Image (spheres, helix red, strand yellow):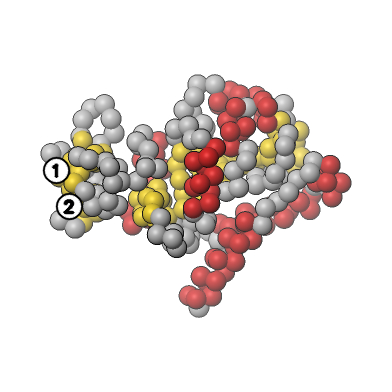
Amino acid sequence: MKFALVNGIKCTPKPKTDGICSFCASKVNSKCGDINIWHWAHYSKRECDTWWENETKWHRDWKGHFPIDWQEVTHRADDGERHIADVKTEDGCVIEFQHSFISKEERLSRDNFYPNLVWIVDGLRRKRDKDQFFKAIDSAVTLMVSPLLKKVYIDESKLIKEWQTSSSLVFFDFGEEQRIWWKLPFKDNSFAYFVPFSRTEFIDFQLGKMDVDFISFLNKCIKDFMLHLSGDHLRQQRIIVPNRLSALQSSNRLRRMRRL
Ligand SMILES: [Zn+2]
């Protein structure tokens, strides 16, 4: 973990320091070596979050864009189940940075656990994913030019296939400086729909630096895409747009109303 409590304060690891895990309250020790990224390690992990994955520089670079208070936040469901969110924004969106392989079952349980979940998936973990993905994008049908909307055959990329059924918001990160790739939440057995998304804007949306809120913006994009694609096309492709986004929007709306 990047943070532990030292004298009650959320701290990053410093050499030879002990702290307390803010999730399970057990003792942790700083690991500040040359090989692994500096982190806090549990003396005994028994009581801690089973969903936690060891972090890479990629995780840390992403998390570092957000305020410390938003990083490694415990989210508690109504039934008492708790997990550590990589980032939980002021809007209540949880962003999970996924580097390791995750089974479909585990992914679904997280999709169901977090009401407003955004996945950022590391597309550089496996050697072939980036090549496969961009080959699939190159040979995909361009449904719209501006913004670019690509209809990709899912069998051409292992990574797309693995994430195809996620009902949450999914973005792939292939380490490109300018952009990440948003997988639209359309349900389709054969095709996935991708839009390049500005990396900077993704972060700025979360930080409240954009004119509209993130979910309203995504909803507007989806509406525009739906308008552009004719009804025939949508019916032929049997595309189903889950109503999850509208639910997200309404929670944001409520929050804004409370603020007023
Ligand atoms: Zn712990």
**Does 222 sit left or right of 16 as displayed?**
right
Instruction: Examine the rendering and report whether any part of residue 205 can be seen.
Output: no
Name which residue lies at 27% across and 51% down: 24
**Label 2 secondary element:** strand
Examine the image and state in which quarter residue 108 appears.
Answer: top right
- Along the line of sight, which residue is nearer the eye, 147 or 245? 245
Chain-order first, disc 1 or disc 2: 2
x%, y% of residue 92?
47, 60
x%, y% of residue 14?
18, 42
Instruction: Examine the rendering and report whether any part of residue 108 can be seen.
Output: yes
x%, y% of residue 70?
37, 55
Residue placed furthest toward the right: 232
Name which residue lies at 57% across and 30% down: 159
Disc 2 target residue: 6
Residue placed furthest toward the bottom: 260
**Label 1 secondary element:** loop
Q: Dot 2 surroundings within 10 Å: few (below 14), some, or many (20 or more)?
A: some
Examine the image and state in which quarter residue 44 appears.
Answer: top left
Which disc is residue 191 wearing? Answer: none
Q: Is residue 30 above or below residue 5?
A: above
Residue placed furthest toward the left: 16
Q: Amino acid at mark 2?
A: Val
**Does 167 sit left or right of 259 as displayed?**
right
Check mark 2 vs ligand 1: CB closer than 8 Å? yes or no.
no
Examine the image and state in which quarter residue 181 appears.
Answer: top right
Name which residue lies at 50% across and 38% down: 121
Q: Amino acid at mark 1?
A: Thr
Name which residue lies at 55% across and 26% down: 130
Which disc is residue 17 wearing? Answer: 1
Question: Mark 2 and mark 1 in contact (Cβ < 8 Å)?
Answer: yes
- Along the line of sight, which residue is nearer the eye, 6 or 130? 6
